[in-house]
Amino acid sequence: MKKIYYILLALFPIVGNAQTTEKQPWIEKGWSINANIGPTIFLGDVSQLKPLETKLGYGIQIGKELSPYLDARVQLLNGKLAGTKEKYNGGGLANQYFNANFFDYSLNLKLDLLTLTKGEADRKYSLYTYGGVGFVDFTSKQYNLLTDAVENSVGYNANGDKTRATTEIMFPLGIGVGYNVTEQLNIGLDYSKRFALTDKVDATKGKTNDIYDYLSLGLTYKFGGPKDTDADGVANKVDNCPDVAGLLQFNGCPDTDGDGIKDSDDACPNEKGIATLQGCPDTDGDGIKDSEDKCPTVKGIAAFQGCPDTDGDGVEDSKDDCKNEKGLAEFNGCPDTDGDGVKDSDDKCPTVKGLPVFKGCPDTDGDGIGDNEDKCPSVAGIVANKGCPEVKAEVKKVFSQALVGIQFESGKDVILKSSNTILDKVVTVMKENPSFNLDINGHTDNSGDPQKNLQLSQKRADAVKLYLMNKGIDAARLKATGYGDTQPIADNKTKEGKAKNRRVEFKVVF
């Protein structure tokens, strides 16, 4: 492995001395790789021409163009060798055969004969020769042809176990022809003789060193393609800017800032931009190029020379006190949601159209009290009642009379007929005052079971509600609740007190 390393290392000084002044990456300057396969033929002590014995070999080559007609190549070849010597014809050898495994590696110089003799041209065919120096590692066994017994070996111990391959110097010399399928792909036929400085390849010691041949069919890939002075991947013959590195999409012309617009069409060739602005940048993406944008890093609109109006209210953010809320110019961009002329931040009722005098709140009933402070916003009232209407004295009198005027059969929820007069007065009050709603609250004294008292008070309140409904009062205006003996207004220890506590109260609500 160290020898392979040294051979590869030897290639690079040669390559370094062959660099041209063209500014191209090293992989683009004539490097190539080749894969090949074919028969091997041994020519040595244990061999004969008839019949000719062949084995299989295969290898790779890494090449570097040094000039139009000269390449340096590292070749690696792996394969098998075999030979047979049946009859004695001098040298004292007969009835022998051998098998060997080998791996050779060499550094070669390849000479293109057509280019050397006829100059550079766009040819489909090539003719070349090459030579070099390297090493061959091998193990080998020589057998008796009649008994198949091992007589000699290289790389094996006395027990026939493989130990270590032998390494010897080897000189390859070859010739070949090639056909260029494309500018980068070549198929070729190659023949080489490989002269080993040893006579042990066939495990037989003779008078001359061993030789083996390799005839191969190979496929070569050439990196870099045709001449490209500026190393931009576009061949000079189709490069509109052959001396300046560029892009294939622009026929070899540059796009310095990489924005997809070639420099000749780019108004800002050193700044990455967009096509709609002739290659100039629009950092914030608002359609206004940075050189004309007063706010180049914040997306804006043309009306404000690229500065933003975040809420889209027509007021530039720099002059907008409410830049995240759509508003009006008269309020410095702040909103007036209900459109009452009072901006939302000063409007106590921002979603309901109102009056400035009530800080933006309405006065629905027109009583001069804003709805936000009016407990009866839909019924005109007075300040003393916080916007609710005044309950007239005669109405209060009717409800006061009802406290003692509504009577029931003892322990029942049946209204006595004597109570109809006062109940009819209540009906009249409700009809004359359609804004009134009425709470009907039933109460008892503390005689008997509290739970039953609660139930009785509820039934009596319901009975009064039913009476009023039967007289034409909408049930939606009436609410009946029984409180039992929980809210006495007199002492339940006396007969008089108990009588007062048994009552039905009316309360006007709005």
Image: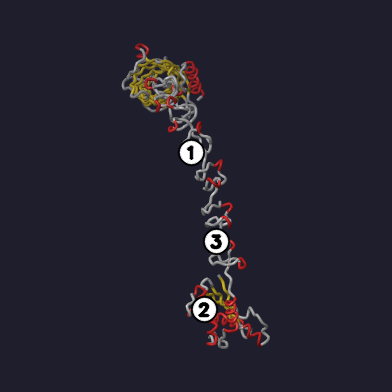
Q: Toward which corner of the image does residue 263 lie, by quadrant? A: top left
Identify the secondary structure beneath mark 3. Answer: loop
Residue neighbourhood size for the residue with mark 3, other residues' Cα within 10 Å, grouped as few (<14), some (14–19), many (≥20): many
What is the CA distance from the residue labelled 1 to the residue labelled 3? 41 Å
Q: Are marks 1 and 3 in contact (CB under 8 Å)?
A: no
Against 310, residue 368 (above or below) is: below
Query: Residue 256, percent across and down?
Result: 47, 26
- Most extreme residue toward the top is 117
Marks 1 and 2, Cα distance to the nearest angstrom? Answer: 68 Å
Query: Mark 2 to mark 3: distance in Å?
Result: 29 Å
**Residue nearest the viewer, comparing 12 with 330:** 330
Where residue 433 sits in the image (x, y, percent)?
52, 73
In which quadrant will I find the C terminus? bottom right
Mark number, residue 428: 2
The answer to whether residue 162 is above or below residue 111 is: below
Disc 1 designates what residue?
A: 303
Nearest to N terminus: mark 1 or mark 3: 1
| Residue for badge 3 | 363
Q: What secondary structure is found at the residue carrying circle 1?
A: helix
Amino acid type, callout 1: Ala
Q: For the residue marked with disc 2, what is the amino acid?
A: Thr
Q: Earlier in the sequence, mark 2 or mark 3?
A: 3
Query: Quadrant location of residue 184?
Result: top left
